[in-house]
Image: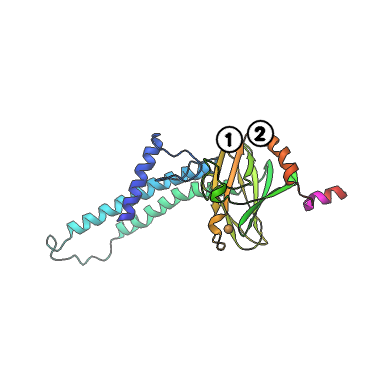
Amino acid sequence: MSAIFMRYLSLIAFLLGTLGVSAAGAAQPEPWQMGLQDPAGSIAQKATDLHNLLLIIISLISVFVLALLVYVGWRFRSGANPVPSKTTHNATIEILWTVIPVLILIVIAVPSFRLLYYMDDTKNADMVIKVTGNQWYWNYEYIDEQIAFDSYMLSDDELQPGQPRLLSVDNPLVIPADTKIKVLVTGNDVMHSFFVPSLAVQTYAIIGRVNEVWIDVPEGETTYYGQCNQICGVNHAFMPIVVKAMARDDYQAWLLEAKEEFATLTATQPIQLAAVN
Ligand SMILES: [Cu+2]
């Protein structure tokens, strides 16, 4: 009952959101937030659209089932219906309650598979970043630029005004806006999970295995916050992810500085091979 009520509340929140009444606007969780974080990038936009479609479908189903239960409880109560029917089969209604749910599932499956294949397509990426989960920090490697750095959470006394507690880091993952970026995710010790809600990215960081996803954040300088989403030890809650998106020109400027600060001494394997040839 309370689940149905909550879904109904979510639907109202969603409808308010579509009218522009929603207060959500940042790429981080907010107090009393009702819906998903605002989507950033094409995958997140499509995922939010699918979520909104599903919210309408499940709300209608919940309201229909609740109404049916209330009607049956009232119509067939012992006072009004002292002699119960002995009916056990009704071909028409059995066909209906099989076919209609199948049709609903098809309606859900089509956009769902379309989104899965869209997310899976990492071809034609403009750049590649390798993300490695460690106990308990992230390492970001810009493979083509030969830079890599660790990203640790800031402690409370290191926080600057405006930086969210438990979400801010010393070195954020800096990316250019409006660029298709392939993200290779792996782990170094135990399983972690790279999760940035507003980008709709959640991928396991597994030792000895590379998972790939892609992101493309829209124009504008925005900071997106995420967290490790796989219980990975005592400091699991203290390895946040900060993705800082900026215009391409600003990104190039950052890259020049980063190359001085974070240059890796060893080139990655494919670059070494190219140099030999
Ligand atoms: Cu972790």
The numbered disc on residue 250 is 2
Say which residue label 1 marks. 221
Pick the quarter of the image with the N terminus.
Answer: bottom left
Amino acid type, label 2: Asp
Q: Which residue is drawn at 23% across and 65% down?
A: 87
Residue 242 seen in this snapshot: yes
The one of 261 and 253 positioned closer to us in this rendering = 261
Q: Residue 169's x, y, as percent?
A: 59, 48
For the residues bearing labels 2 and 1, Cβ distance under 8 angstroms:
yes
In the image, is residue 152 part of the stretch drawn in magenta?
no
Q: Residue at x 32, y 59 (%)?
A: 94
Q: Which residue is drawn at 85% across and 48% down?
A: 275
Q: Which residue lies furthest to the top in this view?
A: 249
The one of 250 and 57 positioned closer to us in this rendering = 250
Where on the image, by quarter, is ligand 1?
bottom right
Q: Residue 207's x, y, as percent?
A: 65, 62
Q: Residue 164's x, y, as percent?
A: 51, 45
Question: In the rendered structure, which disc, 2 or 1, sits on the residue that comes first in sequence?
Answer: 1
**Which region of the structure is painted magenta?**
267-272
Q: How far apart are marks 2 and 1 (CA)?
A: 9 Å
